[in-house]
């Protein structure tokens, strides 16, 4: 027992070091109500289901808004069920020490009410039972130890007082007599008047209503405290939203938010990478938006086109398609092209308008995440979305077809970068 007490004191001291100081921790309580001895009772002796006859007083200390310790002292009287039982009267005293848990705060009752909370406790205690009549007459009480637990529902009346309803269960140990005192609480009867201490038990419960009185200088007690940082104020929310809006700004209008944009002053209309940098697909030193032949290297003097004449325009577009320069990419489970890649559709539309003999098929693909049938439908929607972009840009619908090809299994599905490359729409010359 000494080890248990020292252990509880050690826990209390440790938690107290880390306890918050912006709420009150001490409270006193007084309760009164019903009791009932459940068993053992001598045959022929019955007790009422609800009998007024119990009073208790308690003090509680909360380390924080979740856990604490309490001490309780109770007095009361058990008696017979009038008209159906032999008469008996037993007075009792009880004291207990318990660990307390604020279930209401642990389960966030404040999300639907700040007036109610619930406490649960568990501990041990000592008591004394003294029947008026006993099988072996004696003025000496029947001393017991006990295991005690209770559930309490609290309603906040003011910052200093709360109404409390409590149901407690108590299990006595080494209870030598029945609650009425007219039988031994053990098998057989001893040969001598002295009854040995045995591990026989007795169970009784109480149901009470009472008041909690909160002590301290702070505005709130731990029972009702809500950490300030748990809920942001309106000003804090407004500041956070403003910061997010600022971060998502796209100052140069290239479809890449400023916080991701490594080239925040891109020229209007430029084709950019996912990081917002102007693309130079053929690495000839002329960015794509200034390069009249963005997929064939050439000097700046010819606006990025090779000096030799390009005779077959379809080969020029086929090279750009084969090397992935004109793909459009999509977000996960989306058939809306990502902003930074929509310039590819503009390039293809302009090329088709300058080369009216060419026809294209738009090919949609998906990554390997998800069901195969669903991915087939998603790839079809992606192809249709790009088809619609080309038609909206002025390309005759009769020159275009679209088809979904489902999952692209040629890429490593374990790589996030590879899966992003798979979520695309490509083109094929027809």
Image (cartoon, rainbow, N blue to C red):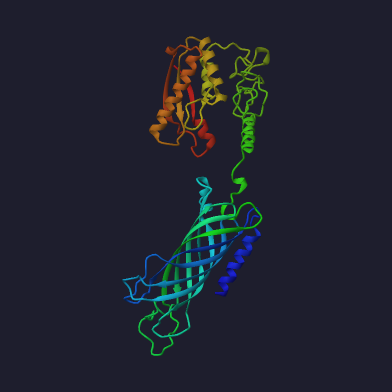
Q: Report the side of 228 relative to 134 (left or right).
A: right
Residue 69 visible to the viewer: yes
**Quadrant (top left/top right/bottom left/bottom right) for the N terminus:** bottom right
Q: Nearer the viewer, residue 202 or 298?
A: 202
**Residue 247 location in percent, x, y?**
64, 31
Q: Relative to 32, say whether 250 is above or below.
A: above
> Image point 47% across, 27% down: which residue?
335
**Residue 428 location in percent, x, y?**
46, 20
Q: Nearer the viewer, residue 220 or 310?
A: 220
**Residue 259 location in percent, x, y?**
64, 31
**Quadrant (top left/top right/bottom left/bottom right) for the C terminus:** top left
Specify the quadrant of the image occupied by residue 206. bottom left
Q: Relative to 112, say whether 161 is above or below.
A: below
> Image point 36% across, 76% down: which residue?
87
Residue at the front extreme of this rendering: 83
> Image point 61% across, 41% down: which residue?
232
> Image point 49% across, 23% down: which residue?
426
């Amino acid at each position: 027992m000494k080890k248990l007490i020292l252990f509880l004191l050690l826990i209390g001291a440790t938690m107290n070091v880390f306890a918050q100081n912006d709420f009150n921790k001490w409270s006193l309580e007084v309760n009164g109500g019903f009791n009932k001895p459940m068993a053992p009772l001598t045959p022929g002796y019955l007790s009422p289901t609800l009998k007024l006859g119990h009073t208790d007083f308690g003090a509680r200390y909360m380390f924080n808004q979740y856990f604490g310790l309490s001490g309780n002292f109770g007095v009361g009287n058990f008696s017979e069920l009038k008209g159906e039982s032999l008469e008996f009267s037993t007075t009792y005293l009880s004291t207990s020490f318990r660990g307390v848990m604020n279930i209401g705060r642990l389960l966030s009752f404040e999300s639907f009410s700040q007036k109610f909370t619930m406490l649960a406790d568990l501990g041990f205690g000592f008591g004394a039972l003294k029947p008026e009549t006993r099988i072996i007459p004696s003025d000496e009480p029947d001393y017991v130890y006990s295991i005690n637990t209770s559930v309490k529902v609290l309603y906040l009346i003011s910052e200093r007082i709360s109404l409390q309803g409590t149901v407690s269960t108590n299990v006595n140990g080494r209870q030598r007599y029945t609650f009425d005192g007219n039988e031994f609480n053990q098998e057989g009867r001893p040969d001598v008047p002295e009854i040995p201490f045995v591990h026989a038990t007795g169970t009784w419960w109480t149901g009470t209503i009472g008041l909690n009185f909160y002590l301290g200088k702070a505005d709130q007690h731990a029972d009702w405290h809500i950490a300030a940082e748990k809920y942001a104020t309106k000003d804090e929310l407004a500041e956070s939203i403003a910061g997010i809006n600022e971060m998502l700004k796209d100052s140069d209008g290239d479809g890449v938010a400023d916080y991701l944009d490594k080239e925040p002053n891109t020229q209007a209309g430029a084709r950019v990478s996912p990081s917002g940098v102007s693309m130079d697909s053929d690495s000839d030193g002329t960015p794509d938006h200034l390069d009249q032949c963005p997929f064939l290297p050439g000097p700046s003097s010819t606006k990025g086109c090779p000096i030799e004449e390009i005779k077959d325009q379809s080969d020029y577009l086929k090279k750009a398609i084969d090397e992935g320069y004109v793909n459009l990419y999509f977000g996960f489970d989306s058939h809306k092209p990502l902003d930074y890649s929509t310039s590819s559709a503009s390039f293809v539309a302009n090329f088709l308008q300058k080369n009216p003999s060419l026809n294209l098929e738009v090919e949609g693909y998906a990554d390997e995440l998800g069901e195969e049938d669903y991915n087939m439908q998603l790839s079809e929607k992606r192809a249709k979305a790009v088809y619609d972009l080309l038609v909206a840009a002025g390309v005759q619908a009769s020159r275009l077809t679209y088809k979904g090809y489902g999952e692209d299994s040629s890429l490593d599905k374990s790589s996030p970068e590879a899966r992003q490359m798979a979520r695309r729409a490509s083109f094929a010359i027809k």
